[in-house]
Every structure is written in C-alpha cells, then in structure tokens.
Image (cartoon, grey):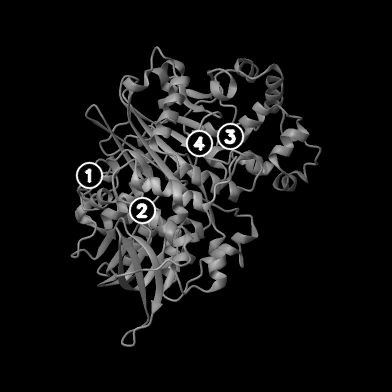
Amino acid sequence: MKKITRRDFINGSAVALGATTLPSPLAWALAAEGEAYPPALTGLRGNHPGSNTMAHARAWNADFDLDQIVDTQESYDLVVVGAGLSGLAAAFFYRQKFGPDKKILILDNHDDFGGHAKRNEHTIDGRQLITYGGSQTLVEPREAPEAVKALFEGVGIDLTRFDTAFNQGFYSDHGLGATTYFNAKQFGRDTVVRHPFGNYYNYIEGLPGAAISDEEAVAQTPLSKRGQRQLLHVLKSGLHSLDVSEDDLPEYIKTHNYFDYLTQTLGVDDPQVLYMARHSAIDWSDASAELLTIKKAKEAGALGFAPVKVYDADHPYIHHFPDGNAGVARAIVNHLIPSIAEGTTAESLVGAKFDYGQLDRPNHPSRIRLNSTVVDVHHSPDKTEKERVSVHYMRGDKAHKISASHVVMACHNAMVPHIVSDLPGEQANALSEQLKSPLVYTSVGLRNWRAFKEQGIGLAMSPGNMHQTLFIDFPVSLGGYRHTEGPDAPCVIQMISCPYSEQANIPAKEQYREARYRMLGTPFSVYEAEVREHLSGMLSSESFNFDRDVASLTVNRWAHGYTVADREDPAAGPGGSVTVGRQPHGQITIANSDSAPEADAIAAMEMGYRAVTEL
C-alpha cells in the first residue's frame, strides 16, 4: 500500500474537498447568516468540506503568515475558541461567575455550533426526523459533578424526563434484536445471523441479544469449517483459559495483548475469525482490537467475552435527546442568546428551529461566530490597562483581529501549540502529545423499516463493511417529537465507522493518521455507494430497495473524534502530559474533553468549568 504523505494530502484530498462535493465557502458563510439551516443539511457533515482547511494550513506550515489583518476594534471580556460542549459550558460558567452582562464571543471553524454534539434533521415525505451526528448520550448524568448539575438546571434540562422519554420496550416489542451481517465481499456470501458475536449491543437499552445459541449461530456463518470451530472455541472459552492465578489475573490482563490471548492461548489462526475480532470493539475502544490489552478488549465487548450490561439499573443508558447531545448544546446556546428560539427548557427546544441570524448580533452580550478559524492567540500588554490577549481568526479569506481580557481554548488540544504563539515550550510539547481517533457517524433517513422488522434486525454488527455496526436509532420521544412507532413509518438508522489502518499491528497514532487522510479524501459518492451496498446486501430485496426506501443520507466525518487517553496511564496523573498541557497560561486557560482526558460530554463540560475557575 502506498504511504500517504502530507504533500499527497495537501495536493490531493484537501484541495479536492475545497472545490467539490458540497456548497462553496460562500454557502457555508451564508449558513451562519440565516440563509441556510445547518442541521437540515445532508451530504458530508461533521468536519464538512472547508471546515479544517485553514486549521491544517496553520498546523502544517511553519511559515504561516497573516497578511492584511483587519483590526475590528472589538473587545471582549472572554473569547472562547471552540463552540463544542466544553466551550459553550465555559461561556455559561463565565457568566455565572462574572455576571450575565460580560461580553463573550465564541469562535468556531464549523458552520454550526455544538462541536461533536451535532444535530441531523431528515425531512421524509413532509415529516421531520431528528437524530444526532456525533456525541450521543449523557453518561450517568445524575452522578455528574455539582457544577455540571447546576448547568443542567440553569439551561432547563430535566434528567427525570428520560425515564419515560426513552422507550425501553421498543426493540423487544417489535421483535428486533442484535445480529451480525457477513457481507459477500469479505466472507463469500451475504448472511445475517441473529447473534451479535460480542457485547456491543448492550449499550442500547432494551435491545435483546442473541436469538439463537452459540452453536446454531456459528453453524449459520459463512466461515469455513475450521473457522467455525475456532469461532465457537472463542465463544466458549474465557479468561479461565489463561494459566494465571486468580490473584495475578487483574494485573495480567492489564499488561497482555488481546490478540496474543486469541492466537496463543486459544490457538486462533483463521484470518476471518481474527478479522471479526479486529472489528468487534468498535467505538467502545480507542484502537483496533489487535492493539488492545485483554482488559480493554473485555471492557469494550470484543469477540469472546460474555455479554454483560454496560450500565446497571441505577445508571441506565437512556439519557439521549432525539438529537443526542446537540440537545444539550442547543439548551446552552438558548440560555446564552434567548432570542434564538422560542422555548425556555431543553424539552421545549427539541422541535424548535433556531434563528442562526441571532448568533452574532452586536446587541447581545454573548455571541457565537461560526466559519471562523482561530489561527493566532497571544498576550499583548496594553500600557493603559492590565494585560490583554490578542486573537486572530480567519473568516473566508480575510484575517481579523480582536482582543479579550480572558481566553478559553476549548478546541482540540493538540492544535493549541499551533495557535497560542507565546506558549511555553514544555506545555506546547505536552499538548502536542494528545490524540483523537477518527470516527464516522452516518445517519440514514428511511421511508419505512419493514425489512428490518421482517428480519428482526435492531442492530447489525458488520465486520466486513466500512460501517462496522448499524442500528435503528434510539427510541426517544420528547417535547412533542415522536420516535418512529411502526415499520411502515419513516425512521432513522445510525451507522458507525471506526476507520483503522488497512494494515494491522501498526501503532495507533499511525493508524489514526492513515484513516484520517483516507476519510477526508473520500467523496460523498463513495460513502453513498458503501451505504447502498451495505443495506442492499443485508436486507431482503423483496422488502428493501435503496432508491425507493432511502430518502436522505448524512455522513458526519470526525477527523479528530474521540479523545484517546488511558486514565490509568501516568500521563493522566500529576506531572503527566495532560496535567502539564492544561495548565493556565497567563490570561489563557485550556478546556475540551482532551484535558480531562476522557471522551465524554460531561467531562467536556467539567473541563469548561475548570478552565473558567482558573481565570
């Protein structure tokens, strides 16, 4: 396989993305002015074409220079870099600490706020369906830190509403369960087996698991006889197969590799079984499974580990808005800019259409400026006042300058050293070590889901496809919005891709880089063709026709998706890279989930709170 270089990417993919596929930069700018409605846009979303172009130019070009800077003469009490949950939370906490009259500006390089908490809308035959394009769930929010609970209360989020909003009986009531789809391209023939061969399904509350025994399921797979024997051996084995004492087992599984366990302890050498294992952990892990320890593989529900509930009865996985954590982002934005929508609670905002033209009005103390990539932040002492911070950002092809008393960097932490030009070297190096894994969350609007009902598919693990899993979207009805009620009604399915390197066993960082370049260089037509092939191969042709039944398709690409950090790693503790990287720097503080470090919405908001308290 040809090695992809930066030059290849800059000369090829990045240029192509800026010139083709979806609307021009002007169209993206118009979206912020109210001429388009970002949540309703389909095609390539998430890191939409053009959103990262200037950031990449800043990070990769040591000679990056700003010509013809427009000094807007704008002055703010706080500038937040990044309009994700951490940045929005920082603005909320700043107002709480210093007063609601303080002038706040939030800058973001995308055409929508929320960061990974992205709202997708699909209009099908006149009916609006709502779903998410990234951050999906509040995990154990009733155990959140007090500051985050205060935020929930302040923006009108009532966590008890999810007890009835999430229909935990939906999947079982319709006979939908967890399955595995083996496609013809990888496994020889298209086959659906009503068995998940893993634990992933357990994070969807109320979704039944295997409908048939391990033996019956394995016999139905398109694997060779040898592969079937090895797969069944993996399913019937367990950690008791290790020649390790009970006392030594916890430490052993933390320090030994999952694939070594499969190949050396269990004797697996069938390439198809190992291929299944590599793709079995999906987004519950931070890398492809051959790089995981046994402990991480077990926690991620990888192939061969007995299914267990991800959350217990006291912490059910039900705290989803119909648009995922975009519901949280919208509630915070509505609190900061009340004129943007009608409604005072998060529930009342579920179906509201936000007026994006209200985001950046001079008469509002809090403002959000989209399509604006921050490229330089540094302290600039003013002889007449206390030290201030100079902020430069690009909007379109023009550079703009503003100033602030305080700045919270709530963006991807690895970008901070490229932006904060007066950052100390040790801190810059520590921030540069932070990693994020790439993700693709694709939402598909269907006119009906009869084929899913007939085949009993609530979720399908799909190890041979670009999207390694798909499922009928979480059954949440809230604020007048109703989830699909029957197979003849429209619905949304979610498809998740955790792109890895096509070459196994190379370091995670290299896998992320290769997969990221491939993701950003893939045009929408290729994603659409993959989804067409996936659904058409999996579903019965008697009940499903792609051109007839698929009404809309939104591909949410996240080049820098989940924060990757091991909380048991010394880097996460005192003196480690995360702790060093997130230290305050004069009037500048660091937020984002990277500084937790944890890929979690509540952690992101908590880091916004921490950053404000450090100002």
Q: Position of residue 188 (x, y in %)?
A: 58, 19
Frontmost residue, 268 versus 245: 268
Q: Gap in Å between the C-alphas at discs 3 and 2? A: 36 Å
Q: Earlier in the sequence, mark 3 or mark 1?
A: 3
Asked if labels 2 and 3 touch by Cβ distance under 8 angstroms, the answer is no
Amino acid type of the residue that numbered disc 1 sits on in the rendered structure? Lys
Q: Position of residue 168 (x, y in %)?
A: 42, 31
Q: Earlier in the sequence, mark 4 or mark 1?
A: 4
Q: Is residue 14 above or below residue 570?
A: above
Q: Where is mark 3, residue-wise?
A: 279
Asked if labels 1 and 3 touch by Cβ distance under 8 angstroms, the answer is no
Q: Gap in Å between the C-alphas at discs 3 and 1? A: 38 Å
Q: Where is mark 1, residue-wise?
A: 353
Which of discs 3 and 1 lies nearer the camera? The answer is: 3
Q: Earlier in the sequence, mark 3 or mark 4?
A: 4
Asked if labels 1 and 2 touch by Cβ distance under 8 angstroms, the answer is no
Residue 47 in the figure: left or right of residue 6: left
Residue 72 shows up from this direction: yes
Amino acid type of the residue that numbered disc 4 sits on in the rendered structure? Tyr
Label 3: which secondary element: loop
Q: Gap in Å between the C-alphas at discs 4 and 1? A: 30 Å
- Name which quarter of the figure residue 308 lies in: top right
Q: Where is mark 2, residue-wise?
A: 152
- Disc number for residue 203: 4
